[in-house]
Image (spheres, rainbow, N blue to C red):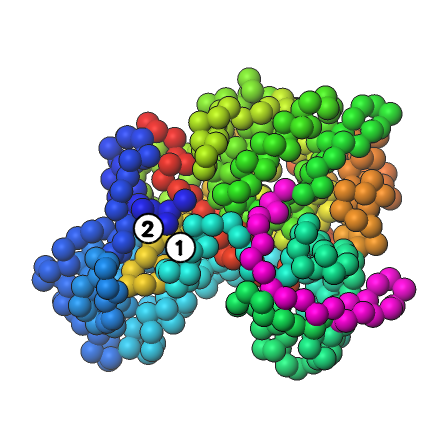
Amino acid sequence: MHGKKRCAWRTVAACLAAGVALFGCGGGGGGAGGGTGDGPEAGAGADSGTELPQIVASRSVAGRCAAPRVGTADRPGSLDNEKRWVRAWIDETYLWYDEVPSLRAADYATSVAYFNDLKTPALTASGRPKDRFHFSADTATYEASEAGDAQLGYGIQFAYLSSQPPRDVRVAYVGPDSPADQAGVRRGMRLHTIDGLDVARSNEVDALNAALAPTVVGEQHRLGLGDAQGSVVEYTLSAAQLPSTAVMNVRVLPTSTGPVGYLQFNEHSVAAEAQLMDALTALRASSITDLVLDMRYNGGGLLGVAAGLGSMVAPANSSRGQTFERLIFNRKNPFGPPSAARVTFPDAAVLGPRTGQSLPRLNLPRVLVLAGGATCSASEAVVNGLRGIGVRVDLVGATTCGKPYGFFPEDNCGTTYFAVQFQGVNARGEGDYGDGMAPTCAVPDDFDHALGDPAEARLAAALTLRSTGLCPGAPTLAVASAAPAASSRAKPAAEPQLLHPRPRLLDDRIVRPQDLAPQ
């Protein structure tokens, strides 16, 4: 992962343009480009407050900070320098740089506030903002989240069926051996109260959110949770640092036409690669004939993990050395020629202590994916990448979130900025799903059954689709093609979305330089 050694974007571009492998790229630290910042451009065209400033080269103002960090490449500068860097970096690297409105930097109190508005105002065909993904993070916090896979919390992932009062919030899943698991919290429970506040109707939104996102180990909050019979129990839970549960509920389901593998995949994190390798090795040993991959709550993460999963699922003869995802940049091609920007299906692990180990392969010509509105980014890339090499992927559930875009995160003056810098397309050039990928079978989420239970609605529908070629309750919906009919694009009512956000690293499409194929 990037961390303190991540490549600055200009270093990435230089490596790509030179056509070399990127494993040795160093740099980072003080902002984009590593320029001296001492040339005449650094102070040219300063914002007088009455007119728009001239856009300079980002390298001329990179790392010139109002409050330089000790022990970094930061140098004394000003808030104006920081704003000018943000505007320049957007102009140079943002995918839709020519759609960004003209804004007066002086109207913004901080560079982050300025950055927040430096994005396209365009809408998708459905009327949603085209760019719903623009964000920034404190660099130290972001690097800490990259460095490890432990997450602070109770071990509950929530989903909401209604975000407006009266709210309807459910437990989506519970991490094994977490405080919530040990207390007896289970999937499907409805969240009634938090510290005595009525979740359905309370206006104390900040207090509700603060309790759902604890900040220190040992922080305690009281959660009133009810079961299907309406009995409410108040659980006092203490926040803990919890190991990654990227992969859960790995099992083999016996059917009349052969064993079917199932696994719940929650996040494309560093820890996910090893967990996926272990899970798929076990499923391969059970001689499964099909795989149901449950990514209904997987918001994304590292694209290299997604590519590795693709390799472990797909036939080796169709995936080896092939393009998993090609990156399309803006018209300026700031990161080098498009031919150099692609992620291939790997043969070996690329993360942590297993780097270089051969990946297990299921060699399956098709996979069934359980998906919904929280299936996003790198998870959608798995679907798109497999379809690009001819693997049949049937989606069961609801329309995915719609994020074919990604970032090269960049630090400047203590803030790491994430602006959409590329669109990902598969080997066939397909990647236009800004409004999401439609399900082959539309099935509402089922909170009355555990994930992995063959009776759970989405899993049951996937097993029926596999055996009969038909969607339960919709016998007229043909599924001969991996591309579903347009009429299936509507989401089922009450499609849940994640309520408590995970670290943004886990909900984005992050590309590391070493993920890109050497030229």
Q: Which residue corresponds to mark 2?
A: 4
Q: Is residue 253 magenta?
A: no
Q: Earlier in the sequence, mark 2 or mark 1?
A: 2
Instruction: List the single residue furthest toward the right.
Output: 229
Asked whether the viewer can see residue 103, the reply is: no
Q: Nearer the viewer, residue 37 or 260?
A: 260
Residue 133 in percent (x, y) is at: 49, 58
Q: Secondary structure at mark 1?
A: helix
Task: Residue at 58%, 77% (x, y): give it.
Answer: 206
How busy is the neighbourhood of tag 1: few (under 14 within 10 Å), some, or many (20 plus)? some
Task: Residue at 33%, 27% (x, y): give it.
Answer: 519
Looking at the rendering, the stretch of residues picked out in magenta corresponds to 224-247
- The total of numbered circles placed on residues is 2
Residue 437 in percent (x, y) is at: 63, 45
Q: Secondary structure at mark 2?
A: helix
Residue 377 in percent (x, y) is at: 54, 47
Q: Is residue 237 magenta?
A: yes
Q: Amino acid at mark 1?
A: Glu
The quadrant in which the N terminus is found is top left
Q: Is residue 452 above or below residue 227?
A: above
Task: Check if mark 2's residue and mark 1's residue have beta carbons within 8 Å.
Answer: yes
Which image quadrant for residue 248? top right
Q: Which residue corresponds to mark 1?
A: 143
Q: Nearer the viewer, residue 148 or 64?
A: 148
Q: Nearer the viewer, residue 81 or 441?
A: 81
Task: Residue at 73%, 24% (x, y): give it.
Answer: 286
Which image quadrant for residue 76? bottom left
Q: Amino acid at mark 2?
A: Lys
Q: CA distance from mark 2 to mark 1?
A: 7 Å
Residue 240 in percent (x, y) is at: 58, 60
Q: Is residue 307 above or below residue 258?
A: below
Task: Residue at 45%, 37% (x, y): give it.
Answer: 352
